[in-house]
Amino acid sequence: MAGGGKRTPTPKSIIHQKFGAKASYRVEEVYDSSQSGCPGLAIPQKGPCLYRCHLELPDFSVVSNVFKKKKDSEQSAAELALEKLGIRPQNDDLTVDEAWDEIVGRIKYIFSDEFISAEHPLGAHLRAVLRRDGDCCGSVPVSVIATFDAKINSRCKIINPSVESDPSLVISYVIEAAAKLSDYIVASPDVSSLRRKNPYPSEIVEALATHVSDSLLSREVATVFIPCLGEEVVELETLYISSDRHYLDSIADRLGLKNGSQVMMSRTFGKASCGSECRLYSTIPNKSSDKSSEASGSSNEDSSHIEKTRNARASYICGQDIYGDAILASVGYRWKSNDLDCDDVTVKSFYRICCGMTPNGIYKISRQAVIAAQLPSSFTTKSNWRGPLPREILCMFCHQHRLAEPVFSSSNAPVESLSDIFRSHKKLKVSGVDDADNDNLSREKEDTPGSGMRFRCEVKIFTKSQDLVLECSPRKFYEKENDAIQNASLKALLWFSKFFDELDVEQPSDTDDDQDIKSSTPNVFVAPPISHNGHSSESKPIDVPSAEKRVQSITNGSVVSICYSLSLAVDPEYSSDGESPSDDESPRDDIESNEDMEAEVDAEYSVNCEPSIELIESNEEIEFEVGTGSMNPHIESAVTQMTVGEYASFSTTPPDAAEALILAAASDTVTVRSLLSERPTLNYSILLLGVKGPSEERMEAAFFKPPLSKQRVEYALKHIRESSASTLVDFGCGSGSLLDSLLDYPTSLQTIIGVDISPKGLARAAKMLHIKLNKEACNVKSATLYDGSILEFDSRLYDVDIGTCLEVIEHMEEDQACQFGEKVLSLFRPKLLIVSTPNFEFNTILQRSTPETQEEDKTESQLPKFRNHDHKFEWTREQFNNWASKLAKVHNYSVEFSGVGGSGEVEPGFASQIAVFRREASSIENVAEGSMPPYKVIWEWKKEDGDKKD
Ligand SMILES: C[S@@+](CC[C@H](N)C(=O)[O-])C[C@H]1O[C@@H](n2cnc3c(N)ncnc32)[C@H](O)[C@@H]1O
Ligand SMILES: [Mg+2]
């Protein structure tokens, strides 16, 4: 072994030793979107550009992940290349021969006097085998050494990197290495266990024996038996384990194997899905006899042939090839201790693990709604997404399937001129949907309109050895980088889902989305087993609630919360002869009121026989966004026709494919299995608890063309033109949407100023202004952005021609809004001040969803809420008029009320209410200049000298 002084060579140096000048590194700068340069910006931005390294070797090339430092990207590329070459730098670059020597040395050490009392995961096993029966006493199953010794495992990887997917290889290497130690170690006649030639000294054995008797243990643990033959059902199996034998011997009994030495252990898996870490236990495949049985063809009918058949279900859940029957169990010694740790594993756990292999399943399980929830087909806004974000699910999926971490690379591009965007907005339909789906709505979020940059993101999925599995490059741009990342992740997840659900993605596909995706054949996955359960595996037509009955009253983009329960029921009348009654063409597709429901129950079930009903899944409160496919379509279509507080129930016929999901959700597997065999119906009961309307910008986008934000800008522009203003301050400028839009039109403005307290908003505003002012010819001679609260007075902003304060006051507490009113009219004293804020009364319309259903009356619980979770208040027209009129009177301003969105003449007035204050007093006092102006210049631009640092 390497001595203490020896330093592990870096991956790059190993590559250099091996390839010298034939290794060529090319480092690429990855344009970090947060870094659109903006000279003079006094807000610290994220570090400089990121780097990705391409390493070309004579036979192949690799691409690193993205790193902040060039040299890290080079090391990472070198490491990936080493992995591909099967060389592990942490092993001090051992050769295959050296690895063999180390395995031999390690095995010898494992059987030494000293190791048996060592604190090592193998220690408890070595001690337990001393209690094995008869001949087996002291024999260590080879699979135990192969599974629990990390050092042997890492050396085996040097010999053959594919040990990772084939644990039986490690077993065979251990056997081969042990054969070189015939002076010390004896192999059992079937060579699947190893024992010391000379017994341990008696004092050691005695010491261990007393130790063990203290913790004698005997217990039952629930495990799951997964028969090799797909037709046989997966069953619960009780395992009796006791500390007077090794637990592998107990498992061997159930598998019909001679003893624990013939048992192979899989890797651990399933932690996320069933709480504890599970392994599969199966027979050690006999590779050589496998070949002979294959060669002799199907005429070979002996039992060993059956045993060596691949177990598709077991292989699927652990991603390794498993042969013969298998047992799924969570049992093992706690790290370094003699105590056996056991957890019950149920049939439900098995189905949950199966379910968790796919992106859709990961989502379902993490939402604890296996039947109800579905991986949404679009990502609209982060605030509407429920459950783990697409990027997290993608990482979990890759981890699950032993793929490398997904590699994201985002790029950005300046937006076309804002007017182009507005033009494209005009093409949108009422729902705000563009050509393909709703995604573009996330461009229209409140805080970044016109931030000047648009993002797209590409994601690549590689195997751990850097083979490309999937490349997903959506062409769509988003205003937020995170939206681009989440959307790219979701696209990749949907592709993987499709792969698992259909297994036919290689067929040419012509949808837009599929053009964004390239994949090499994903033979990296163990294919899901296809269940054959006698009936057709096609989904049967499902009885759905009829759409004509009621109109959808909850719009896409709303987030609803429901309470539901799903149960499986077999009506003896329906099932007895296996035939449906003649009137079955009219499915039980009712959404009914609570009373109707009861009536029907009476009529149908009270005849003579009781239906068998089993609860499958229930949820006291779950939220989902309507219109993104994030909920079982039957539930969604029912819910969108309901009003808050309403209860509905209906039934569907579950398709065969739902069987596994039903078993993953239900607790009583035995009952559910028997119901499933009797043509059951799946009964849904739903209570609509609440509806949150679509977000402010989505609602506005759906209702107003042009969008309200654009209408506000146009309103301000009209006043700028009319007043020939030359100086403007935008109070609470955010990311500069107003300033940005102003620059799209020729105006009299020469000085523009923005103030805000949000560094993020100001940074975006600065980047946008930097691009626009240096590009477009306009009258503006100076632009300044200040970091400061508009509740404080700064004399540099005194006496400007126009002050604007659009959609800002409602983001402060009400008393602060009053304070701002006082300050702005008494101290800043702009000649004209335009203040806009939502009209609370208009919310009923915005939140009532589609305009067609506006007649419906509102119940208490559906009273409108604020348009945005950040709003501290929203005023009625009366409240706003009071506020503005009093202020105007006190400070010698006149005030006029107006608005945008809707009409001032028709109830309930404008969607955005606007007050325009005009200064009446002609005399303007000289303002006392305070000691230190409170605002901090964040960015400044002057026409003469272009960009100038502050
Ligand atoms: C909804 S955004 C409106 C941004 C911009 N006026 C627009 O119309 O796009 C509200 C802005 O008010 C800012 N804001 C809230 N309280 C503030 C305060 N006390 N001083 C300055 N800005 C404030 C927030 O940081 C945020 O950028
Ligand atoms: Mg607002």
Image (cartoon, rainbow, N blue to C red):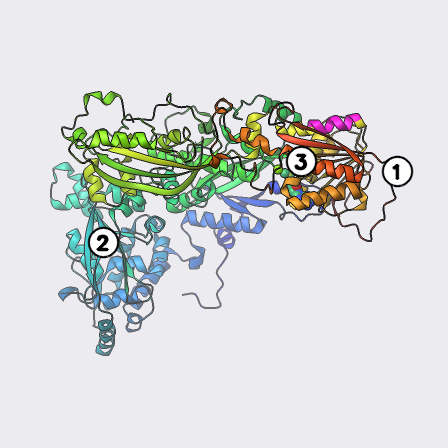
Splitting the image into 4 quarters, where does residue 541 fall? top left
- Residue 923: mark in rendering: 1
Q: Which residue is mark 3?
A: 880
Q: Is mark 3 within 8 Å of ligand 2?
A: no
Which corner quadrant of the figure contains ligand 1? top right
Splitting the image into 4 quarters, where does residue 125 fall? bottom left
Label 1 secondary element = loop
> Could you say which is closer to the camera, residue 661 or residue 946?
661
Say which of marks 3 and 2 sits in front: 3
Residue that appears at 17% across and 31% down: 607
C-alpha separation, residue under disc 3 versus residue under disc 1? 28 Å
Task: Write down the region rendered in magenta.
Answer: 714-722
Label 3: how many residues lie within 10 Å, few (<14), some (14-19) or many (20+)? many
C-alpha separation, residue under disc 2 versus residue under disc 1? 89 Å
Q: Which residue is mark 2?
A: 222
The x and y percentages for residue 732 are: 69, 40
Label 2: how many residues lie within 10 Å, few (<14), some (14-19) or many (20+)? many
Label 1: how many residues lie within 10 Å, few (<14), some (14-19) or many (20+)? few
Amino acid on which the number 2 mark rests in the picture: Ala
Q: Dominant secondary structure of the magenta stretch?
A: helix
Which of pointers 3 and 1 lies earlier in the amino acid sequence?
3
> Could you say which is closer to the camera, residue 176 or residue 112?
112
The x and y percentages for residue 461 are: 44, 40
Say which of marks 3 and 1 sits in front: 3
> Could you say which is closer to the camera, residue 885 or residue 76?
885
